[in-house]
Image (cartoon, grey):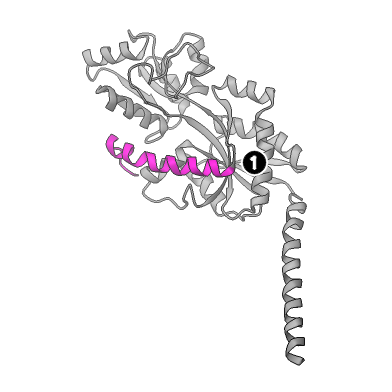
Amino acid sequence: MLVGHHLWRRASAILVISLVALASFPLAAQTWPNRPIKLIVPHSPGGVTDVIARLVAQPLGDALGQPVVVENKPGAGGILGTDIAAKAAPDGYTLLMLVDANTIYPSTTLKLNHDPASSFAPISVLGRGSHVLVAHPSVPANNLRELIDYIRAHPGELSAALPSYGGPQHLALEMIKSNAKIDVTPIPYKGGGQAITDIVGGQVRLGLLGMAPAIPHIRSGRLKAIAVTGASRSAALPDVPTVAESGIPGFETNQWQSMVAPAGTPPAIINRVHAELQKIMSQPAIKDKLATIGMDNYTSPTPDALGKMIRDELDRWPGIVKAAGIKAE
């Protein structure tokens, strides 16, 4: 009888503990957020990543009932701010803008203190677009086929300005060079601003750039758009063919922005933020603003879909980096 009583008491205790544990999880989800949320942008104010972060921060804060405060943490091409986010508490009060370049850094950086896949809980892509190959008006070519012919007839004459060494635009240029078997000297800059200035000024006559800084100069006629790098034409430049259309079948590179959280952030929080971002990104005003900077309103159907995309990108770049002869720094 005593044994039976003991077993009954033990079973009751286990049941109580289980019920408390089950009750605590939805309670935590119900109380989040109860203070402002930090959204880290690991780049300087004014760039595409910063623009998109600020575009979604206010409506996301309105939806969650707490301010979402954008904090710029530039440095080391975005690695510094990404490291800060990776070390933050996984409590839903720190979010991060993770971009295409983050999936390249493991191939181009000797020491990285985070893993773009395992250090973060994916939430959603927030816009996707092409890079664009541009030329100074003095270059006697109006499309990629004409440009390739000109470069082959004048080897070593042209160089191309790039926003960074080993970044997505650099790798896209190297892929074009390899496929077309042409000789173009890459000139990496520390940011797209000076690169644009030098192409417009004719100091460098080609460039491979993000859409946002290039579009105003293309529309004004100060630069010629030769080709876009995405799988399909850009709505911002509908008359400009893709690299794939222009003689390099299957070619595709994209610029993309995404939002993630530190690994271990509760799934209920991840799913809530994902659901709100999908609503925000479908708003006409948001879509219109993205279109002005050459981005579409693409979002991930699930957080896991972003996780898969990040892993696929991590698998893609090492071979391309090696083939381009880009050395890790």
Residue 198 colored in magenta in the image: no
x 50%, y 19%: residue: 234
* Residue 189 picture quarter: top left
Classified by dominant secondary structure, the portion drawn in magenta counts as: helix
Residue 324 colored in magenta in the image: yes
Could you tell me which quadrant the N terminus lies in? bottom right
| Magenta residue span | 303-329
- The residue that mark 1 highlights is 274
Residue closer to the observer: 248 or 99 = 248
For residue 63, say whether it is visible.
yes
Q: Which percent across, then down, holds residue 198?
A: 41, 20
Q: Which percent across, then down, holds residue 319?
A: 31, 40
x 29%, y 34%: residue: 324
Q: Please say if 238 is above or below 12.
A: above
Q: Residues within 10 Å of mark 1 (few under 14, many from 20)?
A: many
Q: Amino acid at mark 1?
A: His
Q: Which percent across, then down, holds residue 3?
A: 73, 90
Could you tell me which quadrant the C terminus lies in? top left
Residue closer to the observer: 107 or 6 = 6
Q: How many discs mark residues in the rendered view?
A: 1
For residue 154, say whether it is visible.
no
Q: Please say if 284 is above or below 40.
A: above
x 69%, y 38%: residue: 276
x 47%, y 18%: residue: 233
Give the SS element for disc 1: helix
Q: Which percent across, then down, holds residue 116?
A: 48, 47
Q: Is residue 139 left or right of residue 52?
A: left
- In the picture as drawn, the residue positioned furthest to the bottom comes out as 2
